[in-house]
Amino acid sequence: MATNNIRIIVDSAADIPANVAEQLVILPMTLRFGDTEYSDGVNITKKEFYEKLIESDSLPTTSQIMPLAFEEAYREALSDGCDVVVITVSSKLSGTYQSACIARDEVGGNIYVVDSLSAAIGEGILAEYALRLVREGKSAADIAAELAKKTEDIRVIAMLNTLEYLKKGGRISKTVAFAGEMLSIKPVVHIADGEVKLLGKARGSKQANNLLVKEIEAAGGVDFSMPVLLGFTGIEDSLLKKYVEDSTSLWQGHAESLKAERIGGIIGTHVGPGAVAVAFFKN
């Protein structure tokens, strides 16, 4: 949970491989299906979330973490003699960053809050990098400063399988969604300046895969000395496997194996099942 007396705290919007997650404190955000409330990752798994999402007529809602939850985590860490580094989902997507700062000001002590300006696997690779800095013996203040600098290099690019959930969430019109489904349009999105933005649209998965590859190249390629993480939404990962197969030129000779993680409900609510994503630090 803590190394070198530094505790790394993240929110559950971060998607992180299990062996990395067990070295962090993860505070759950809230998911609501109708009148039923769940603590993300506590009493609902990612797979269960997608099972409910597919069955549900209306979109679930998500809620930020309240300052009190951060206060409790901070006090526990400080009483254990730890300094604290907090990494949150983008402040433009949730009020969680603000909650973390309010709690820091309330508690005092060596607590440093970093706005990832990202989400899901993008927030995940920043947390993984934070643990590397802890192992290198950096102080909490230095780790927070380095993470804040590195947020500018994170790229998260995703190919969505459907426009249905963007339509349900009011992000696009019904007409655009209908036309997109008829033409088998696959939107490609990325996180830029802390917000989810449309990069382009492709007809069919193959074109969308090509667009994904092009965007990675346009970013200057992947810095393979840093954490890289693939992500997928939904119950199974066949589309992700196909993407990896179709884009071997990107990874061959650079990465022995690629880590992949199911993206949780906080972001999955808005993109729906069948999305494929990659998060990396650009060269």
Image: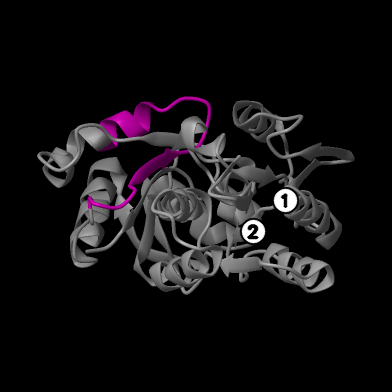
Q: Amino acid at mark 1?
A: Ala
Q: Which residue is mark 1?
A: 77
Q: Residues within 10 Å of mark 2 (few under 14, many from 20)?
A: many
* In this view, 123 is above or below 28: below
* Residue 238 included in the magenta stretch of the image: yes
Local SS, label 2: strand
Location of residue 110 in the rendering, given as x and y in whole percent from the top left corner: 67, 67
User: Which numbered disc flags the more N-terminal residue, 2 or 1?
Assistant: 1
- Marks 2 & 1, CB-CB < 8 Å contact: yes
Location of residue 218 in the rendering, given as x and y in whole percent from the top left corner: 20, 66
Residue 120 left/right relative to 251: right
Q: Please give the name of the residue rendered at 47% of the width and 45% of the height, measured from the top-left corner.
A: 162
Q: Amino acid at mark 2?
A: Val
Location of residue 176 in the rendering, given as x and y in whole percent from the top left corner: 50, 60
In the picture, residue 258 is in which quadrant?
A: top left
In the picture, residue 211 is in which quadrant?
A: bottom left
Magenta span of residues = 224-243
Residue 216 visible: yes
